[in-house]
Image (cartoon, rainbow, N blue to C red):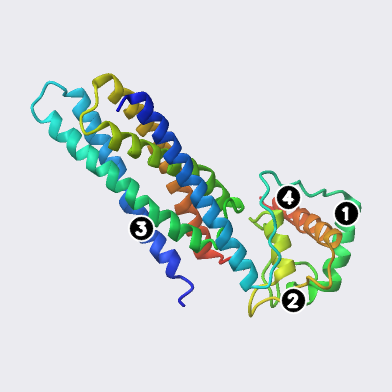
Amino acid sequence: MDQTLWSKAHGAATHFPIALVACSAALDTVGWFRAGRPFAGDLHAVGYWTILFGAAGSVPAVISGVLMTKGSVLGHGLLRLHHLFVWPAFGLLIAIATWRALVGRHPARRLLAGYLCGVAAMLTLLIIAAYWGGELLLATAIEPGP
Amino acid sequence: MTSRSATSIALLAGLLAVSSALGGAHLVRQHAMHASHQTPTPERWLEPVTSTSPQRVAQGRKTFLQRCAHCHGVDARGDEGPDLHDLQVSDRYIANTVLRGIPHEMPSFARKLQGDDIAALTAYLRSLEHEADRSDP
Protein backbone atom coordinates (compact mmCIF):
# COMPACT_ATOMS: atom_id res chain seq x y z
CA MET A 1 0.00 0.00 0.00
CA ASP A 2 1.13 3.55 -0.70
CA GLN A 3 2.61 4.82 2.58
CA THR A 4 1.43 8.36 1.86
CA LEU A 5 -2.18 7.31 1.23
CA TRP A 6 -3.46 8.32 4.69
CA SER A 7 -1.48 11.51 4.58
CA LYS A 8 -3.17 12.44 1.29
CA ALA A 9 -6.56 11.34 2.62
CA HIS A 10 -6.08 13.47 5.75
CA GLY A 11 -5.18 16.49 3.67
CA ALA A 12 -8.24 15.95 1.49
CA ALA A 13 -10.60 15.31 4.40
CA THR A 14 -9.65 18.06 6.84
CA HIS A 15 -10.48 21.14 4.81
CA PHE A 16 -14.19 20.42 4.26
CA PRO A 17 -15.17 20.33 7.95
CA ILE A 18 -13.10 23.44 8.71
CA ALA A 19 -14.73 25.34 5.85
CA LEU A 20 -18.24 24.10 6.68
CA VAL A 21 -17.94 24.91 10.38
CA ALA A 22 -16.54 28.38 9.66
CA CYS A 23 -19.35 28.94 7.16
CA SER A 24 -21.97 27.78 9.67
CA ALA A 25 -20.58 30.09 12.35
CA ALA A 26 -20.61 33.05 9.96
CA LEU A 27 -24.19 32.39 8.77
CA ASP A 28 -25.58 31.91 12.27
CA THR A 29 -23.78 35.02 13.51
CA VAL A 30 -25.20 37.14 10.69
CA GLY A 31 -28.63 35.58 11.33
CA TRP A 32 -28.35 36.43 15.03
CA PHE A 33 -27.48 40.07 14.37
CA ARG A 34 -30.19 40.39 11.69
CA ALA A 35 -32.87 38.57 13.68
CA GLY A 36 -35.73 40.77 12.49
CA ARG A 37 -35.01 40.33 8.77
CA PRO A 38 -36.91 37.76 6.68
CA PHE A 39 -33.72 36.05 5.50
CA ALA A 40 -32.47 35.40 9.09
CA GLY A 41 -34.42 32.12 9.26
CA ASP A 42 -32.84 30.95 6.00
CA LEU A 43 -29.36 31.77 7.33
CA HIS A 44 -30.00 29.70 10.47
CA ALA A 45 -31.32 26.84 8.34
CA VAL A 46 -28.14 26.81 6.24
CA GLY A 47 -26.06 27.20 9.43
CA TYR A 48 -27.85 24.18 10.84
CA TRP A 49 -27.05 21.93 7.87
CA THR A 50 -23.47 23.14 7.46
CA ILE A 51 -22.62 22.42 11.12
CA LEU A 52 -24.11 18.93 10.76
CA PHE A 53 -22.18 18.22 7.55
CA GLY A 54 -19.05 19.73 9.12
CA ALA A 55 -19.34 17.42 12.12
CA ALA A 56 -19.97 14.43 9.86
CA GLY A 57 -16.95 15.43 7.75
CA SER A 58 -14.72 15.61 10.82
CA VAL A 59 -15.06 11.86 11.37
CA PRO A 60 -13.14 10.79 8.21
CA ALA A 61 -10.64 13.59 8.94
CA VAL A 62 -9.96 12.15 12.39
CA ILE A 63 -9.87 8.55 11.15
CA SER A 64 -7.39 9.37 8.36
CA GLY A 65 -5.26 11.35 10.85
CA VAL A 66 -5.17 8.47 13.31
CA LEU A 67 -4.19 6.03 10.56
CA MET A 68 -1.60 8.45 9.17
CA THR A 69 0.15 8.76 12.54
CA LYS A 70 -0.23 5.02 13.20
CA GLY A 71 -2.41 5.67 16.21
CA SER A 72 -0.37 8.32 17.95
CA VAL A 73 -2.68 10.04 20.42
CA LEU A 74 -0.28 12.84 21.33
CA GLY A 75 3.13 12.27 19.75
CA HIS A 76 5.85 14.85 20.23
CA GLY A 77 6.89 18.26 18.93
CA LEU A 78 4.55 19.79 16.38
CA LEU A 79 2.37 16.68 16.28
CA ARG A 80 1.76 17.03 20.02
CA LEU A 81 0.80 20.68 19.60
CA HIS A 82 -1.59 19.71 16.79
CA HIS A 83 -3.15 16.96 18.91
CA LEU A 84 -3.49 19.10 22.03
CA PHE A 85 -5.87 21.34 20.13
CA VAL A 86 -7.46 18.90 17.71
CA TRP A 87 -8.90 16.50 20.31
CA PRO A 88 -10.81 19.14 22.28
CA ALA A 89 -11.92 20.75 19.01
CA PHE A 90 -13.26 17.42 17.73
CA GLY A 91 -15.13 16.66 20.97
CA LEU A 92 -16.59 20.15 21.08
CA LEU A 93 -17.62 20.00 17.42
CA ILE A 94 -19.50 16.73 17.88
CA ALA A 95 -21.14 18.06 21.06
CA ILE A 96 -22.18 21.32 19.38
CA ALA A 97 -23.53 19.60 16.27
CA THR A 98 -25.46 17.09 18.40
CA TRP A 99 -26.94 19.94 20.46
CA ARG A 100 -27.99 21.78 17.30
CA ALA A 101 -29.50 18.64 15.81
CA LEU A 102 -31.57 18.12 18.97
CA VAL A 103 -32.63 21.73 19.47
CA GLY A 104 -33.48 22.40 15.82
CA ARG A 105 -32.80 24.92 13.10
CA HIS A 106 -34.20 27.93 14.92
CA PRO A 107 -33.26 27.87 18.60
CA ALA A 108 -34.33 30.69 20.92
CA ARG A 109 -32.23 33.83 20.70
CA ARG A 110 -30.76 33.38 24.20
CA LEU A 111 -29.80 29.76 23.47
CA LEU A 112 -28.36 30.74 20.11
CA ALA A 113 -26.06 33.28 21.81
CA GLY A 114 -24.62 30.53 24.03
CA TYR A 115 -24.36 28.24 21.02
CA LEU A 116 -22.42 30.87 19.05
CA CYS A 117 -19.98 31.29 21.98
CA GLY A 118 -19.39 27.52 21.94
CA VAL A 119 -18.91 27.57 18.16
CA ALA A 120 -16.41 30.44 18.49
CA ALA A 121 -14.41 28.53 21.11
CA MET A 122 -14.44 25.37 18.99
CA LEU A 123 -13.48 27.27 15.84
CA THR A 124 -10.56 28.88 17.69
CA LEU A 125 -9.29 25.46 18.78
CA LEU A 126 -9.80 24.13 15.25
CA ILE A 127 -7.88 26.99 13.64
CA ILE A 128 -4.95 26.59 16.07
CA ALA A 129 -4.94 22.83 15.43
CA ALA A 130 -4.99 23.48 11.67
CA TYR A 131 -2.10 25.93 12.03
CA TRP A 132 0.06 23.35 13.81
CA GLY A 133 -1.03 20.75 11.26
CA GLY A 134 0.26 23.01 8.49
CA GLU A 135 3.53 23.58 10.34
CA LEU A 136 3.85 19.83 10.78
CA LEU A 137 3.36 19.29 7.07
CA LEU A 138 6.13 21.77 6.28
CA ALA A 139 8.49 20.23 8.84
CA THR A 140 7.96 16.65 7.65
CA ALA A 141 8.28 17.70 4.02
CA ILE A 142 11.76 19.01 4.81
CA GLU A 143 12.89 16.30 7.22
CA PRO A 144 10.94 13.01 7.08
CA GLY A 145 10.77 11.11 10.37
CA PRO A 146 12.10 7.58 10.90
CA MET B 1 -36.75 18.32 24.21
CA THR B 2 -35.52 20.84 26.79
CA SER B 3 -32.26 22.66 26.18
CA ARG B 4 -30.84 21.21 29.41
CA SER B 5 -31.32 17.59 28.32
CA ALA B 6 -30.09 18.47 24.81
CA THR B 7 -26.91 19.90 26.37
CA SER B 8 -26.39 16.75 28.45
CA ILE B 9 -26.82 14.48 25.45
CA ALA B 10 -24.54 16.73 23.36
CA LEU B 11 -21.76 16.63 25.97
CA LEU B 12 -22.13 12.87 26.19
CA ALA B 13 -21.88 12.61 22.38
CA GLY B 14 -18.74 14.76 22.38
CA LEU B 15 -17.08 12.66 25.07
CA LEU B 16 -18.12 9.47 23.31
CA ALA B 17 -16.67 10.70 20.00
CA VAL B 18 -13.32 11.63 21.53
CA SER B 19 -13.05 8.46 23.62
CA SER B 20 -13.94 6.34 20.56
CA ALA B 21 -11.26 8.11 18.53
CA LEU B 22 -8.68 7.67 21.29
CA GLY B 23 -9.66 4.02 21.74
CA GLY B 24 -9.41 3.45 18.00
CA ALA B 25 -6.03 5.19 17.96
CA HIS B 26 -4.82 2.91 20.74
CA LEU B 27 -5.82 -0.17 18.71
CA VAL B 28 -4.15 1.21 15.57
CA ARG B 29 -1.00 1.91 17.57
CA GLN B 30 -0.93 -1.59 19.04
CA HIS B 31 -1.37 -3.08 15.58
CA ALA B 32 1.33 -0.86 14.05
CA MET B 33 3.77 -1.70 16.85
CA HIS B 34 3.03 -5.40 16.51
CA ALA B 35 3.50 -5.24 12.74
CA SER B 36 6.90 -3.55 13.12
CA HIS B 37 8.00 -5.79 16.04
CA GLN B 38 8.41 -2.79 18.32
CA THR B 39 7.45 -2.52 21.96
CA PRO B 40 4.73 0.04 22.57
CA THR B 41 5.94 2.97 24.62
CA PRO B 42 3.38 4.70 26.83
CA GLU B 43 2.51 8.27 25.97
CA ARG B 44 3.55 10.79 28.62
CA TRP B 45 2.28 14.32 29.00
CA LEU B 46 5.59 15.58 30.28
CA GLU B 47 8.91 14.14 29.26
CA PRO B 48 11.79 14.45 31.71
CA VAL B 49 14.37 16.99 30.65
CA THR B 50 17.67 15.36 29.78
CA SER B 51 20.38 16.20 32.25
CA THR B 52 23.26 17.92 30.44
CA SER B 53 25.88 17.89 33.20
CA PRO B 54 29.52 17.90 31.96
CA GLN B 55 29.99 14.28 33.14
CA ARG B 56 26.87 13.19 31.29
CA VAL B 57 27.97 15.01 28.14
CA ALA B 58 31.43 13.44 28.36
CA GLN B 59 29.87 9.99 28.71
CA GLY B 60 27.65 10.72 25.72
CA ARG B 61 30.63 11.93 23.69
CA LYS B 62 32.40 8.64 24.40
CA THR B 63 29.37 6.65 23.26
CA PHE B 64 29.05 8.88 20.22
CA LEU B 65 32.67 8.25 19.18
CA GLN B 66 32.22 4.50 19.60
CA ARG B 67 28.86 4.10 17.87
CA CYS B 68 27.95 7.13 15.79
CA ALA B 69 31.07 8.99 14.64
CA HIS B 70 31.65 6.46 11.86
CA CYS B 71 28.68 7.86 9.94
CA HIS B 72 28.05 11.27 11.52
CA GLY B 73 31.72 12.35 11.73
CA VAL B 74 33.82 12.81 14.86
CA ASP B 75 32.60 16.40 15.20
CA ALA B 76 28.98 15.33 14.45
CA ARG B 77 29.00 17.68 11.50
CA GLY B 78 27.91 14.86 9.21
CA ASP B 79 29.59 12.45 6.85
CA GLU B 80 27.48 9.62 5.48
CA GLY B 81 24.85 10.56 8.05
CA PRO B 82 23.48 14.07 8.62
CA ASP B 83 24.84 16.92 10.74
CA LEU B 84 23.55 16.46 14.30
CA HIS B 85 23.96 20.04 15.45
CA ASP B 86 20.72 21.94 16.03
CA LEU B 87 18.36 18.95 16.14
CA GLN B 88 14.79 20.26 16.26
CA VAL B 89 13.34 17.06 17.73
CA SER B 90 12.37 15.83 21.19
CA ASP B 91 14.45 13.57 23.44
CA ARG B 92 12.05 10.75 22.79
CA TYR B 93 12.41 11.19 19.05
CA ILE B 94 16.20 10.89 19.40
CA ALA B 95 15.83 7.79 21.60
CA ASN B 96 13.36 6.21 19.16
CA THR B 97 15.64 6.88 16.22
CA VAL B 98 18.65 5.39 17.99
CA LEU B 99 16.71 2.36 19.20
CA ARG B 100 14.70 1.65 16.06
CA GLY B 101 16.96 3.04 13.37
CA ILE B 102 15.72 4.42 10.07
CA PRO B 103 14.84 1.89 7.36
CA HIS B 104 17.55 1.73 4.68
CA GLU B 105 19.42 4.65 6.30
CA MET B 106 20.50 3.93 9.85
CA PRO B 107 20.78 0.67 11.82
CA SER B 108 19.00 0.03 15.11
CA PHE B 109 21.17 0.30 18.24
CA ALA B 110 18.64 -1.38 20.51
CA ARG B 111 21.00 -4.27 21.26
CA LYS B 112 24.10 -2.16 21.68
CA LEU B 113 22.92 0.77 23.78
CA GLN B 114 21.07 0.79 27.10
CA GLY B 115 18.75 3.51 28.40
CA ASP B 116 21.56 5.22 30.29
CA ASP B 117 23.78 5.30 27.17
CA ILE B 118 20.96 6.86 25.15
CA ALA B 119 20.30 9.47 27.84
CA ALA B 120 24.01 10.37 27.84
CA LEU B 121 24.07 10.43 24.05
CA THR B 122 21.05 12.73 24.04
CA ALA B 123 22.81 15.01 26.55
CA TYR B 124 25.81 15.15 24.22
CA LEU B 125 23.60 15.99 21.21
CA ARG B 126 21.86 18.70 23.22
CA SER B 127 25.26 20.15 24.11
CA LEU B 128 25.95 20.41 20.37
CA GLU B 129 22.84 22.57 20.02
CA HIS B 130 24.27 24.99 22.59
CA GLU B 131 27.59 24.89 20.73
CA ALA B 132 25.74 25.80 17.50
CA ASP B 133 23.98 28.67 19.33
CA ARG B 134 27.30 30.05 20.57
CA SER B 135 28.92 29.87 17.13
CA ASP B 136 26.04 31.76 15.49
CA PRO B 137 26.83 35.49 15.01
Foreground residue, B65 or A13? Answer: A13
Residue B85 seen anywhere in this rendered image of the structure: no
Q: What amino acid is labelled 2 in the image?
A: Cys
Q: What amino acid is labelled 1 in the image?
A: Arg
Badge 2 element: helix
Query: Which residue is the extreme one toward the front?
Result: B1
Name which of mark 4 and mark 2 comes first in the sequence.
2
Give the residue pinned by disc 3. A13
* Rendered residue at 44%/58% (across/down): A63
Q: Quadrant of residue B88?
A: bottom right
Please state the horizontal and vertical placement of residue B21, each as a whole percent of the image.
49, 51
In which chain is the residue bearing label 4? Answer: B
Give the residue pinned by disc 4. B134
Say if A79 sits above or below B60 in the image.
above
Q: Are marks 3 and 1 in contact (CB under 8 Å)?
A: no
Please state the horizontal and vertical placement of residue A86, each as a whole percent of the image.
47, 45
Q: Nearer the viewer, mark 1 or mark 4?
A: 1
Badge 4 element: helix
- Characterize the local packing of mark 4: few (<14), some (14-19) or many (20 or more) Cα atoms within 10 angstroms: few
Give the residue pinned by disc 1. B56
- Please tell me if label 2 and label 1 are on a single chain: yes
Q: Nearer the viewer, mark 2 or mark 1?
A: 1
Badge 1 element: helix
Name which of mark 2 and mark 1 comes first in the sequence.
1
Q: What amino acid is labelled 4 in the image?
A: Arg
In which chain is the residue bearing label 1? Answer: B
Q: Are marks 2 and 1 in contact (CB under 8 Å)?
A: no
Of the numbered discs in the image, which one, if any, rests on residue B71? 2
Q: Nearer the viewer, mark 2 or mark 3?
A: 3
